[in-house]
Amino acid sequence: MDAKRYNEAVKEYADALLRFILKNLNRDMETSRDIVQNCFEALWKKRADVADDKAKAYLFQVAHNQVIDVYRKGGRMLYVEDYHENAIAQDAQTNDTKEILHKVLLTLPTMQRSMVLLKDYEGYSYAEISEILETTEGQVKINLFRARKKLKDIIVNAKTSRAL
Amino acid sequence: MISVDNYEEFIVAYLDGELTTEETKAFKAFFVRHPNLQKELDEYKALILPTENVVFNHKEELYKKESAFIAFRKVWPYAAAILFFIACFPLFKLFNGKEKKTIVAVQPVKTNTSKAVQTNKIKPKAFKQASNKQLARTDVVTPKKKVKKLQSVAKSNKRASIPQQKIIKTVVQQSAIKDIPKDEIKIIKKEIIEQKLVQEEKTKSIKQVDDLVQEEKIIAQQEKRVLPPSMKNIGRKETTLLTINEEKHPVLFETINSSVDLVEQKINQIKELKETPITVCVGKMKLFTINH
């Protein structure tokens, strides 16, 4: 990959990468931009080894690893235990489905969250997700099911509680 | 095979578009048979994240340019090849130059016939180049038989159109003279002087005879008399030359012979010389003139 193709990758994938990191970490825009910059720096360093058609997958792989590093350093904003039913019930009253989904998404494990984001935002197949996250296709299928089931259970329960 | 125990997994796979054509048919057929499960399908549908546009502003901050070093890395093999050929060019030129020099050295030396002609004999190691001063002292002359040979060569050729005042100078290598012992040179000088004196006497007497014959011719003409045959040949000039004994002075003899060889070669090389009088000199000393 030469400089020209690299710059084209910047134009094509910078927005998607920013969205992925924003939804994954729930951090401010500036921090997320820094992480995006780190991802592209990593691609620039490895440009000789990365094929042009694999640039996007490589970027998201680096982004996923960056997110894991952030959580390991203790930068988690929300923990599963912190998000209890009252909070969900409160959010449910606002009928802000988007907000609810985003907050519930943050309660998922990092791997499941990344899978959901790659599937829903980027439209990757199970096979492509398995390649990016360096796992098997079967694991992707199981984790996505568990992630969606959990999302459904939380949201449905919250709506049920509200109704009650 | 879809059932009430695993239908939720199929719902997620169906919504993710991961079911095959056959699986999709079976899935749809299942939900036709179980319409009460349609609600769950709708709930799972609502969990798909809606499209959200996010823009990374100032993407130009992420752009990169190829460094000069990287660009060099791409072209360095070609640059290295060019530098290699440039570096080898002087060697190539030197090699060819050396060959050219040897070729030039082998070529015969051209002579300018409009000026006094000089010949340089490539001598064997035994002979060395003589200085003009040394040669002038010796007053060396050629042996008889060599001169006769020169005369016959000159006679067999036609007259040339170049002016008569052409002088062939033969430079005898000094080594030839240096090898001759000094005592021998003294003896040679003495012999030459003696021979010269004898020659002068002969020339004198020949001149006297010539003068007498001329006078006789004039008188006979006046008196309308015919000269006897014996007297006709007397008037011819004889150029008796000085000789060097080969046994007594072998080195000098060889030197003189080689000088004559050079003269012969020069005459044969240059056509114009065959048709012009040739004066043989040693240094500034004129030895004799060959008239055709």
Image: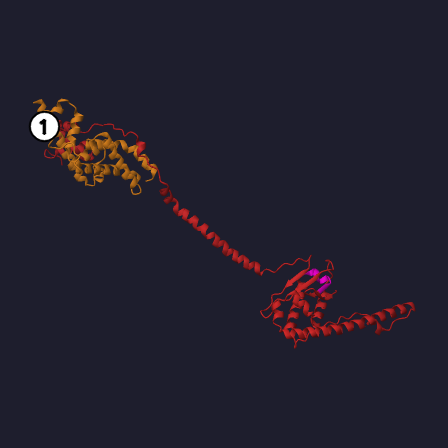
Q: Amino acid at mark 1?
A: Glu
Q: Where, by quadrant of the figure, is residue B265 drawn?
A: bottom right
Q: How many marks?
A: 1
The reply to whether the magenta stretch includes residue A122 is no
Badge 1 is on which residue?
A85
The chain painted red is: B
Asked whether residue B274 is drawn in magenta, I would say yes
Subunit of mark 1?
Answer: A
Q: Where on the picture, by quarter, is residue B280?
A: bottom right
Q: Is residue A122 visible?
A: no
For the residue pair B156 and B261, the one nearer the viewer reads as B261
Secondary element type, mark 1: helix
Quadrant holding the N terminus of chain B: top left
Q: Residue B262 location in percent, x, y?
A: 65, 66
Q: Determine the residue positioned at 43% across, 49% down.
A: B83
The chain coloured orange is: A
Q: Is residue A60 left or right of residue A103?
A: right
Please state the extent of the stretch shown in magenta in the rendering.
B270-279
Q: Quick one: A121 or B84, which is closer to the camera? A: B84
Q: Residue furthest bottom?
A: B247
Q: State the residue in front, A22 or B173.
A: B173
- Position of B235 with respect to B249 (left or right) is right
- Residue at image position (91%, 67%) is B222
Q: Is residue B6 above or below residue B159?
A: above
Q: Tell me the crowding category of disc 1: few under 14, some 14 to 19, or many 20 or more residues within 10 angstroms, Cα based.
A: some
At x 73%, y 65%, the residue is B289
